[in-house]
Image (cartoon, grey):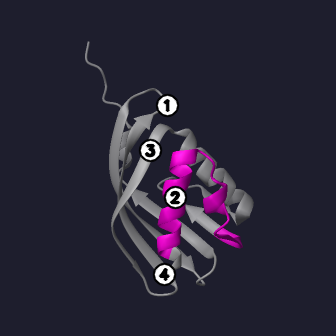
């Protein structure tokens, strides 16, 4: 039987393929919090819906591949690399680590740290 971290990874790949965040959002508790490299914090199931909708909106296509994960029953850690195309058609590849705090059934907190420089376009010299 998969632990919550493994279920999270499977659902993330599902939403990346479908564009519908619902299967992943279902894993979040009512009192959940989500954070990424910005200073914004999302909360609750509505916050999880908004977070994952915004995530998917960045990409024409995206696929996360996980190369290491661990779960101690309360905290899950996932190392990953995501590749795809941004909405402007530019290729993207970046790596990061995501952490979930959970009770075995629902995610209480999600934090993700990644190479945000991958999203910055170099200045064009004239």
Residue 37 falls inside the magenta stretch = no
Q: Is residue 27 left or right of residue 58?
A: right
- Residue 80 placement (x, y as % from top left): 36, 60
Could you classify mark 3 by the number of other residues whose Cα lies within 10 Å: few (under 14), some (14-19), or many (20 or more)?
A: many
Q: Are marks 1 and 3 in contact (CB under 8 Å)?
A: no
First in sequence, mark 4 or 1: give its number: 4
First in sequence, mark 3 or 4: give its number: 3
Q: Residue at x 44, y 87 (%)?
A: 72
> What secondary structure is marked by label 3?
strand
- Which quarter of the image is occupied by the C terminus? top left
- Tell me, for residue 12, which label it has, or none: 2
Q: CA distance from mark 1 to mark 3?
A: 10 Å
Q: Which residues are magenta?
A: 5-32
Q: Which residue is mark 1?
A: 87
Q: Which residue is mark 3?
A: 62
- Residue 7 placement (x, y as % from top left): 52, 70
Residue lying furthest top in this view? 126
Could you classify mark 4 by the number of other residues whose Cα lies within 10 Å: few (under 14), some (14-19), or many (20 or more)?
A: some
Q: Is residue 113 left or right of residue 104?
A: left
Front: mark 3 or 4: 3
Q: Which residue is mark 4?
A: 75
Write down the quadrant of residue 86 in the picture.
Answer: top left
Q: CA distance from mark 2 to mark 1?
A: 19 Å
Q: CA distance from mark 2 to mark 3?
A: 10 Å
First in sequence, mark 1 or 3: give its number: 3
């Amino acid at each position: 039987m998969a632990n919550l971290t493994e279920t999270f990874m499977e659902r993330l790949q599902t939403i990346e393929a479908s564009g519908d965040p619902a299967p992943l959002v279902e894993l979040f508790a009512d009192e959940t919090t989500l954070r990424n490299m910005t200073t914004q914090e999302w909360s609750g199931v509505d916050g999880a819906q908004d977070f994952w909708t915004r995530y998917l909106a960045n990409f024409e296509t995206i696929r996360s591949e996980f190369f290491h994960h661990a779960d101690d029953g309360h905290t899950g850690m996932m190392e990953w690399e995501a590749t795809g195309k941004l909405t402007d058609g530019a290729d993207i590849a970046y790596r990061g680590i995501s952490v979930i705090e959970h009770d075995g059934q629902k995610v209480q907190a999600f934090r993700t740290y990644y190479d945000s420089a991958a999203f910055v376009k170099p200045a064009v010299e004239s």
